Image (cartoon, rainbow, N blue to C red):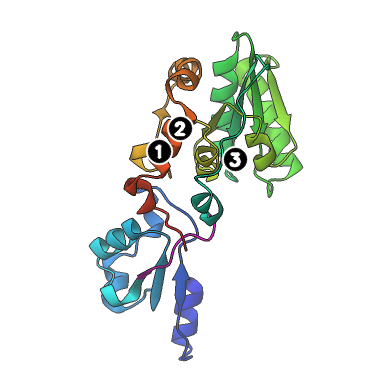
Amino acid sequence: KCLREGIRRCGLKTQFISYQTSTFAPTYLSFYPSRAEISSGRIPDRLWTIGSAYVELFRAQGVPEDRLLMVGSFRYHHFIETRDAPLRSSRGARQDLVVLCATSIDYQEALELVFKAAAAVQGKTGVRLLVNFHPVTSRMFRMRVQETVISLLGREPDGVEYAEAGVQDLLARADIVLYSASGSVFEAMAMGVPAIYVGRDWAIDQDKAPNAVAIRCRTISELRMLIDDVPLKQRPQDILRHLEAPAFDVTASPI
């Protein structure tokens, strides 16, 4: 916004085209233009969205029709186009349940999610928790999360592994994915892996997943129960059926 305003004040004849790279939660207020911005024209000349649902959303906010265009999702096009591919193999002979905790770049979000996940798997036999950090986070960021989780729990948590592999590699091993702000929820669902949104105690909830495909909880006790129930109740075929429904296609569409 500052760059756009500065260039326009300099009188440069430049058109601004803004592209929505990812889904965002309805509570992500900074993504909405204000009435003052719209009335004064301090908005992009063109706003390209990843799905028709966002065209409707921005239209309802007052963005002029001639500035809106749905072009589809570059980030999610791979799994949107391959939703009919064969599902990955199940656990097979492996007896343990692997829970993947996918964190974002925000420290408070990562800490709360990892703490709740680690607390939820304590005392559970045959459950492993893999923690995936966002690739841009620093070594210090990761150490702070690990040390603070130990401090909050009062001991080193059992069954928790801080994995260095990328999220795509870890998804292939996961039976459940936990997230709060990570966009990996969609990659997980596309592979038929149940994803659980863990609500925030310290901030506003910002679940990116559409209601039609969302599984949500907030407390550690709720998460403990879902870890037991979700793999039994939600089959991969059911998850993919949601992704094939109009409710998802209007959110993120093929290019």
Of marks 3 and 2, which one's residue comes earlier in the chain? 3
Q: Verify whether residue 70 appears in magenta.
A: yes
Q: Verify whether residue 59 appears in magenta.
A: no
Determine the image quadrant of residue 166: top right
Residue drawn where x is 49% and y is 37% of the image? 180
Determine the image quadrant of residue 153: top right
Residue drawn where x is 42% and y is 20% of the image? 233
Q: Is residue 250 above or below residue 167?
A: below
Question: How far from the left and from the top, in percent, is residue 95?
Answer: 65, 14
Q: Secondary structure at mark 1?
A: helix
- Return the residue nearer the eye: 135 or 170: 170
| Gap between marks 1 and 2 measured at Cα | 6 Å
Question: How far from the left and from the top, in percent, is residue 93?
Answer: 68, 16
Contact? badges 1 and 2 (CB < 8 Å): yes
Kind of residue at badge 2? Gln
Image-based side of 48 in relation to 88, left or right = left
| Gap between marks 3 and 2 measured at Cα | 34 Å
Q: Is residue 57 above or below residue 197?
A: below
Determine the image quadrant of residue 50: bottom left
Q: Secondary structure at mark 3?
A: helix
Of marks 1 and 3, which one's residue comes earlier in the chain? 3
Q: Which residue, given by chain and number where applicable, does mark 1 sit on?
A: 241
Query: Can residue 205 be seen here?
Result: no
* Residue extent of the magenta highlight: 69-75
- Crowding around mark 1 (Cα neighbors within 10 Å: few <14, some 14 to 19, many 20+) is some
Image-based side of 236 in relation to 92, left or right = left
